Amino acid sequence: MTKPDGIVARFSGSLDAFDLSAEFTLPGKGVTALFGKSGCGKTTVLRCLAGLSHMEDSFLSVKGDVWQDGQDFIPTHKRPVGFVFQEASLFAHLTVKDNLIFGQKRAGDRGQLVHLDDIVSLLGLGDFLSRSAHNLSGGERQRVAIGRALLSGPELLLMDEPLAALDRFSKDEIIPYLERLFQSMDIPMIFVSHDMDEVEQLADYMVLMEEGAVLSCGPLKELLADPKLFIARSPKTASVIDGRIKSFDVADQLTELEIEGGSFLVPGELGDPGSHRRVRIAANDVSLASDLPSKTTILNVLPVHILGIHELDQSRVNILLSVGHNNNGSGARFLARITRRSLNAFSFATGQNIYAQVKSASMLDPHKR
């Protein structure tokens, strides 16, 4: 009988005066972000997954293997888990290579699951294998820490705000390596973050938490486009849309992406036809029109269907849109934020077909293939 592929978790109880009641199911592959405001329980959930915290009324299974239930609890040292903390806890007196080999030794029978040369290549560690860990930059130290965790042969990789201790330059340095790593590894990875920019760039799925409970769990693009969640009220509210490269216009240096229900133009050559890209659309960068604009400098004017109108405050609303006019709302979804005055002036209503002008968009994963 084939074991189920995925993570099933239920953690309930009190720990150091903090009440946790978190339940979620995740796929057995891909990157999940635990996201929420400080103090909502993200790190507590991560510690429960690792077995560092023990709540009696809890359950955890990973790819069909039960790590915790009402009777049994597998301790941390027996769980095939790789754990990366905010600060890279490397052995300063050892070289980079020796730090990596330490992770390999911990793997035991799982040591052949991940190879040293592959990790060195994926994380770009080849140029400083012989350097002392004491003489690395913050971004380099985290790359080594992640590599060491992966060389332990984990069935689950956990990261507690792995970029929080880095400056902007170091973050920009490490993120391309993380993107490449996440696309290459065939194990589930869960990371804690309170930075939505990191989540949008790195995650496939999201567990959204508030005050010790899970508000919502699912694919990132679905949660970011859900106007009922508190993240839709942020000044930086944005949606992500997955696309596939259709063509590149050499003369105008524009790449055309196929998206659900339509197409999208992005400046620059973004890769080979057929490869996938993720686009970020800020809600404040979308304007709406009742009719197709005849003259505009905005490249992306999309036919859209209004799926819902949601009050943000006394002066503004979020409008949930689906790309396409005649596809029953099955197109790519994103949010637009407009004033209540504009809403009333144009008499926009749920079910209406209109046009969205996307003023700008950001490519979130230029290294993804």
Image (cartoon, rainbow, N blue to C red):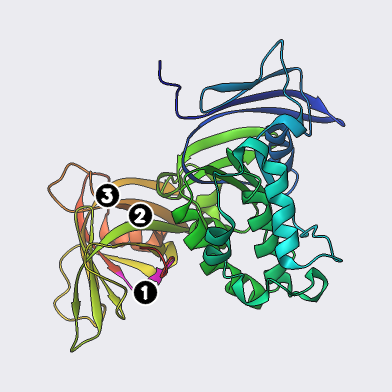
What residue do we see at 79% from left, 72% from top?
132
- The local secondary structure at tag 2 comes to strand
Magenta range: 358-364
Disc 1 marks which amino acid?
A: Ser
Front-most of residues 189 and 149: 149
Q: Residue at label 2? A: 334
Circle 1 packing at 10 Å, graded few (<14), some (14-19), many (20+), is some
Residue pictured at 67% horizontal, 38% vertical: 108
Q: Amino acid at mark 2?
A: Phe
Q: CA distance from mark 2 to mark 3?
A: 10 Å
Other-residue count near label 2 (Cα within 10 Å), few / some / many at <14 / 14–19 / ≥20: many
Q: Indicate left or right for 176 with 245 as reference.
A: right
Assign a secondary structure to mark 3. strand
First-in-chain label (2 vs 3): 3
Residue at (74% x, 52% y) in the render: 102
The residue at which mark 1 appears reads as 360
Q: Quickly name the residue at label 3.
A: 306
Give SS at disc 1: loop
